[in-house]
Amino acid sequence: MSGYPDFNRPAFHEAAARLRAQGLVVVNPAEISGDEDWEWDDWMRAALHCLLGCHAVVFLPDWESSRGARLEREIAEALGMPMFEYHNGEIEPLVVQSTHK
C-alpha cells in the first residue's frame, strides 16, 4: 500500500466491495485500525496477523512492486495458501515459481 496516493486504499476498498458482492468473506488490509504514528513494520505486523487467519489471499494488480505484498506472497506460499490475482472484479489463480519445497 505504501508508495501509492492514499496508500492505494480506493483500489483495496473497490476490490473488497466487488468480492463481497460475490459472497466472499474479505479481510481488507485497508480496514486495519492502527495509530497515526505507526511505521511500515507496524502496519505489516498487523496485516500479517490478519493474513494468518485467512484461507486464501488475493493480490491487486501490480502487487509485485509492493514490498509488503511480496512478503505476504512468500508467507502465503510457504503456508500452502491458495493465491489469486484480482482483475476488474474477477479473481484468477496466481501462478508463481515456487521457492519452497
Image: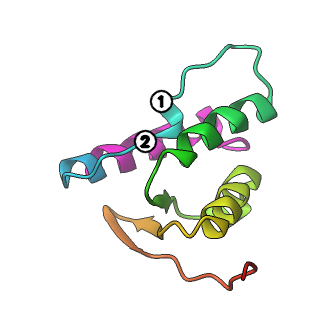
Calculate the distance from the C-alpha at mark 2 to the C-alpha at mark 1: 8 Å
Q: Quadrant of residue 40?
A: top right
Task: Name which residue type carries label 1.
Answer: Glu
Marks 2,1: beta carbons within 8 A: yes
Residue topped by disc 1: 31
Q: SS for tag 2?
A: loop
How would you rate the neighbour count of disc 1 (Cα within 10 Å): few for under 14, some for 14-19, many for 20 or more? few
Q: 34 or 79, which lies in front?
A: 79
Q: Position of residue 71 (x, y in %)?
A: 73, 56
Q: Position of residue 67 (x, y in %)?
A: 76, 54
Q: Is residue 101 above or below residue 68?
A: below
Q: Position of residue 15 (x, y in %)?
A: 38, 50
Mark 1 residue element: helix
Say which residue appears at 77% left-offset and 14% top-offset: 37
Residue 94: x %, y % from top left: 51, 76
Return the residue at label 2.
Answer: 27
Q: Which residues are magenta?
A: 1-18
Residue drawn at 69 percent across, 32 percent down? 43
Q: Amino acid at mark 2?
A: Val
Q: Residue at the location (64% across, 32% down)?
A: 46
In the image, is residue 5 above or below residue 91?
above
